[in-house]
Amino acid sequence: MIKLDTLVLIDFFDHNNLDKKIYDIEQQGTEYKKVARYLENLRIETGITDVVYSAYGSNYELNPNCTDPAFKQHRTFPPDQINRHALYSVEEKPELFKDKAILVAGNSFWSCVRQQDLGILNLSKSGVKSIWSSPGITGYYSPRGKTPEDIFKQTKKPIPYINATIKDFREDESFKWRKVELTDNHCIFKCDIINT
């Protein structure tokens, strides 16, 4: 069994508060529920003990820009088994990160999941033991190098949430990922920028 310690949820904004003209919020709500179920299974399989809500701009989960309710259900992260935190940087609670195995989930795989203060790039420089992620728990609205607004201007249709794929991980030019099968239905990828 692979033991993970801390799950970081980056920018899974409440889909009901997104611009309905630009984003397909009904589809996104459905996809977020799937991601939450996948995370629930990963939590059970890997023994995660802490979840960090990191919706940048949410004022520590206090305003409408907060993390989607699908990721706050007691079934997904039972309070008697999981410690919940709202953080924006490693420095706020270094004990959740120092020498810990971190699972990173979020939107967008190409930008926020990498570049936010609790994203892969900064985590890799912060003394964590290892960084993990999975196609089942990351996604995006647009391909690398384009913004959701670019796509909306092109298509004139509400943009769906797209789950990252194994191909996205294998063809990632920024980070090398190594696939690890957990069960027949679940896999995670270890980011090999940290030599552990």
Image: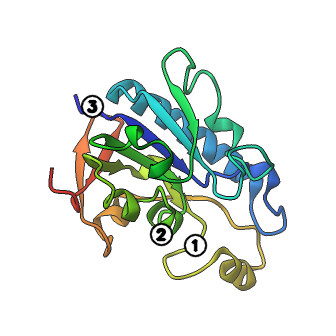
Q: Secondary structure at mark 2?
A: loop
In the rendered view, would you say 82 is above or below 115? Answer: above
Residue 3, numbered circle: 3
Q: How many marks?
A: 3
Tell whether label 2 touches label 1 (CB within 8 Å).
Answer: yes
Residue at 71% x, 78% y: name it: 149
In the rendered view, would you say 49 is above or below 138? Answer: above
Q: Position of residue 8 (x, y in %)?
A: 48, 45
The one of 113 and 123 positioned closer to us in this rendering: 123
**First along the sequence among labels 3 and 1:** 3
Q: Secondary structure at mark 3?
A: loop
Residue at 48% x, 18% y: name it: 81
In the rendered view, would you say 134 is above or below 34? Answer: below
Q: CA distance from mark 3 to mark 2?
A: 26 Å
**Callout 2 amino acid:** Trp
Residue 142, numbered circle: 1
**Callout 3 amino acid:** Lys
**Callout 1 amino acid:** Ser
Q: Position of residue 101 (x, y in %)?
A: 30, 41
Q: Quadrant of residue 191?
A: bottom left
The one of 161 and 4 positioned closer to us in this rendering: 4
**In this figure, which residue is indicated by the disc labeled 2?**
110
Q: CA distance from mark 3 to mark 1?
A: 32 Å
Structural crowding at the residue carrying mark 2, measured as other residues with C-alpha within 10 Å and reported as few (<14), some (14–19) or many (≥20): many
Structural crowding at the residue carrying mark 1, measured as other residues with C-alpha within 10 Å and reported as few (<14), some (14–19) or many (≥20): many
Q: Position of residue 42 (x, y in %)?
A: 40, 33
In the rendered view, would you say 167 is above or below 153? Answer: above
